[in-house]
Amino acid sequence: MSEKVCDHHQDDRRKILRRLCGVILVAGFLLLLVILLIWAILQPKNPRFVLQDATIFSLNVTAPNVISTTVQVSINSRNPNSRVGIYYDRLTVFAAYRNQQITYYSAIPPVYQGHNDVNVWSPFIYGNNVPVAPYNGVALAQDKSDGAISLVVKISGRVRWKVGAFISGRYHLHVTCPAYIPIGNSRNTGIVVGNNAVKYQLSQTCSVNV
């Protein structure tokens, strides 16, 4: 009689284990499905950036290895997503010449960018007596004499994606904006906007990596 009772209990345990395994499999499948759906939704397009213009206040080679710069740039940022918002956190911008940074970091205030929204930032980027490689100082002076310089405006920081009430973790943002500026070119002198300040229209597309 006791053997029959034990067999009955073993059968019950097997049924419970099978049901438990079935529940775990179904729950795992549903969880995987939810993750895949969220992943599909959270495949946002990168924001798009355009360097609209640059106003040159000063760009001087004070010595072969020293450069002083004061520039204001206007940067257009657009969120191309119709369902995903973007939080921009801790953004900084600076200018580089021939792969060497020639200004300090300037901060762009944190901002939320809604669906298909556009923001325009106009930060000042500057550097006083920034040491550079001597050949870069010579090259910049020569470029100014030739009538055009090629700077690169770079933005770095972190972004978060927002879908409904869900907000993702932080992702690194790297934006590179080539700035071909015809400074000193008599055929394209730009627009004088103040004492020794000249504004150049650029409309140059930036590359974006997230």
Image (cartoon, helix red, strand yellow):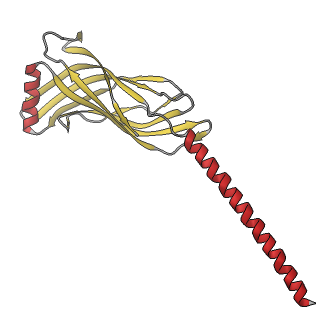
Q: Is residue 64 above or below residue 38?
A: above
Query: Hey, which quadrant is residue 196 in on the image?
Result: top left
* Position above or below: 168 against 103: below
Residue 162 in the figure: left or right of residue 147 = right
Q: Nearer the viewer, residue 15 or 73?
A: 15
The residue sitting at 47% across, 44% down in the picture is 170
Give residue 192's position: percent from left, percent from top. Answer: 22, 10
- Quadrant in which the N terminus is drawn: bottom right
Location of the C terminus (image quadrant)? top left
Could you say which is closer to the camera, residue 65 or residue 46?
Answer: 46
For the question of whether residue 130 can be seen, the reply is yes
Name which quarter of the figure residue 130 lies in.
top left
Residue in the picture at 59% in, 43% down: 38
What residue is drawn where x is 38% and y is 36%? 91
Position of residue 197 in the picture relative to residue 168 (left or right) = left
Q: Position of residue 54 (x, y in %)?
A: 27, 20
| Total marks placed | 0
Which percent across, then down, holds residue 28? 66, 57
Q: Is residue 193 above or below residue 136?
A: above
Residue 30 in picture, x, y percent from top left: 68, 52
Q: Quadrant of residue 2?
A: bottom right
Q: Is residue 65 visible?
A: no
